[in-house]
Image (spheres, rainbow, N blue to C red):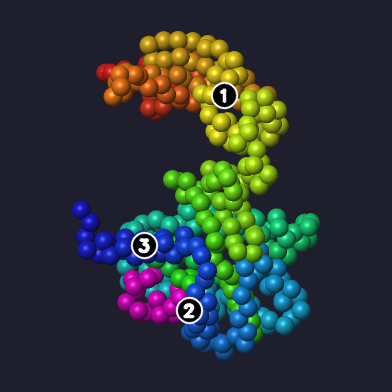
């Protein structure tokens, strides 16, 4: 049973989870006021110009050009984000103590950390791939990305500070939080702030990984997009192939990771059946199947029939992928339960 304080922390986290996953047009008026507030709270003059871009890719490209020209002034990320963040964390930690902070973080920022950090890294990688034409370019793009404040993708930290420090740390982050609620990444410079729109599409699987088989998993209004299958980056043209897969096409794929994506999409059981695979062992637990894959580990699966009948009286068949070293169906089923074969003694097969 959660305490009222824990319930409040979880409610706050839920709000910031929505912020992190928000898609659609930014609230430009609210974001611009947040930018100006962040500058004022940092003791800086408000920026002379606020420029909107369609994505982090466009934002990084514009930030690089402005800094090369010297027209935007020096970067002020430290003043508007890093220092207020560090001061707020110190005050909350001093107030709660190490154990209290750990418990608070577990109910707030930790709930969002993996998904937001993973998404942030994928965006960074996508921006570098889109803009860099060589090793020198790559270094320059990465340096420009270090100037960015992550907007909605700073949600994990903002959830931890939201309303939890008695006003002695959260106020200094009010501008940063306002931008996060209204927009995407942004680049604060002395004279100019560059602010990105949020994504127009975001598709993830149950584990929070980017995942879509029929289009971009993440897309921005200017066309910048990332394609992924269960978290693994894939080329856009690769996804177009998935609807017309055949066992032969899967076997001919030289990239082992892409071949695994094909197998997942096509269905392991279907692939085994249509590839003419033969069972290599049978026992009371099921049937063990194995097929060699060139340049990759063998595909080994256990065919298991559910002993509990369906409403129509039939018995459903399940396919369990198991490690290549598996030698018996019983060993494979035991492995799915985290057991050794000798320790697997089910009362009833299911």
**Of residues 203 and 279, the one drawn nearer to the viewer in this rendering:** 203
198 relative to 238 in the view: left or right: left
Q: Secondary structure at mark 1?
A: helix
Determine which of the numbered discs, if any, sits on residue 30 in the image: 2
**In the rendered image, which quarter contains the C terminus?**
top left
Residue 92 in picture, x, y percent from top left: 37, 71
Q: Residue at x 26, y 18 (%)?
A: 347
Frontmost of labels 3 and 1 is 1
Q: Are marks 3 and 1 in contact (CB under 8 Å)?
A: no
Q: Are marks 3 and 2 in contact (CB under 8 Å)?
A: no
Q: Of marks 1 and 2, which one's residue comes earlier in the chain?
A: 2
Q: Secondary structure at mark 2?
A: helix
- Going by the picture, which residue comes out furthest to the bottom? 45
The stretch in magenta equals 161-179
Residues packed near mark 1 inside 10 Å, few (<14), some (14 to 19) or many (20 plus):
some
Quarter where residue 188 is shown:
bottom right
Q: Where is 203 relative to 108, above or below? A: above
Label 3, label 1: how far apart the Cα atoms are: 42 Å
The residue labelled by disc 3 is 13
Q: Residue at x 63, y 71 (%)?
A: 53
Q: Secondary structure at mark 3?
A: helix
Residue 165 in picture, x, y percent from top left: 34, 74
Q: Are marks 1 and 2 in contact (CB under 8 Å)?
A: no
Residues packed near mark 3 inside 10 Å, few (<14), some (14 to 19) or many (20 plus):
many
The residue labelled by disc 1 is 271
Residue 3 colored in magenta in the image: no
């Amino acid at each position: 049973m959660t305490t009222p304080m824990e319930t409040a922390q979880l409610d706050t986290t839920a709000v910031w989870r929505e912020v992190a996953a928000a898609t659609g047009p930014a609230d430009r008026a609210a974001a611009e006021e947040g930018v100006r507030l962040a500058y004022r709270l940092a003791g800086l003059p408000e920026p002379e110009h606020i420029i909107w871009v369609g994505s982090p890719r466009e934002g990084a490209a514009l930030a690089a050009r402005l800094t090369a020209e010297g027209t935007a002034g020096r970067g002020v990320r430290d003043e508007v984000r890093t220092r207020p963040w560090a001061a707020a964390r110190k005050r909350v930690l001093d107030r709660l103590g190490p154990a209290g902070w750990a418990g608070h973080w577990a109910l707030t920022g930790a709930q969002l950390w993996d998904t937001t950090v993973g998404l942030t890294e994928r965006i960074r990688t996508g921006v570098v791939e889109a803009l860099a034409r060589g090793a020198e370019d790559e270094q320059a793009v990465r340096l420009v990305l270090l100037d960015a404040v992550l907007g909605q993708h700073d949600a994990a930290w903002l959830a931890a500070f939201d309303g939890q420090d008695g006003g002695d740390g959260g106020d200094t982050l009010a501008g940063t939080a306002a931008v996060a609620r209204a927009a995407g990444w942004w680049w604060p410079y002395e004279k100019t702030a560059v602010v990105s729109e949020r994504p127009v599409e975001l598709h993830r699987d149950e584990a929070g990984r980017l995942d879509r088989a029929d289009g971009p998993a993440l897309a921005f209004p200017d066309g910048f997009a990332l394609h992924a299958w269960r978290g693994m980056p894939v080329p856009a043209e690769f996804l177009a192939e998935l609807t017309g897969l055949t066992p032969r096409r899967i076997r001919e794929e030289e990239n082992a990771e892409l071949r695994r994506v094909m197998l997942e999409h096509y269905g392991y059981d279907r692939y085994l059946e249509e590839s003419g695979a033969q069972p290599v062992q049978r026992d009371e637990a099921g049937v063990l199947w194995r097929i060699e894959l060139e340049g990759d580990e063998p595909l080994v699966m256990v065919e298991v029939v559910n002993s509990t009948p369906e409403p129509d009286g039939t018995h459903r068949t399940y396919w369990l992928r198991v490690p290549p070293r598996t030698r018996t169906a019983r060993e494979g089923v035991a492995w799915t339960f985290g057991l050794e074969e000798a320790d697997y003694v089910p009362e009833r097969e299911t």
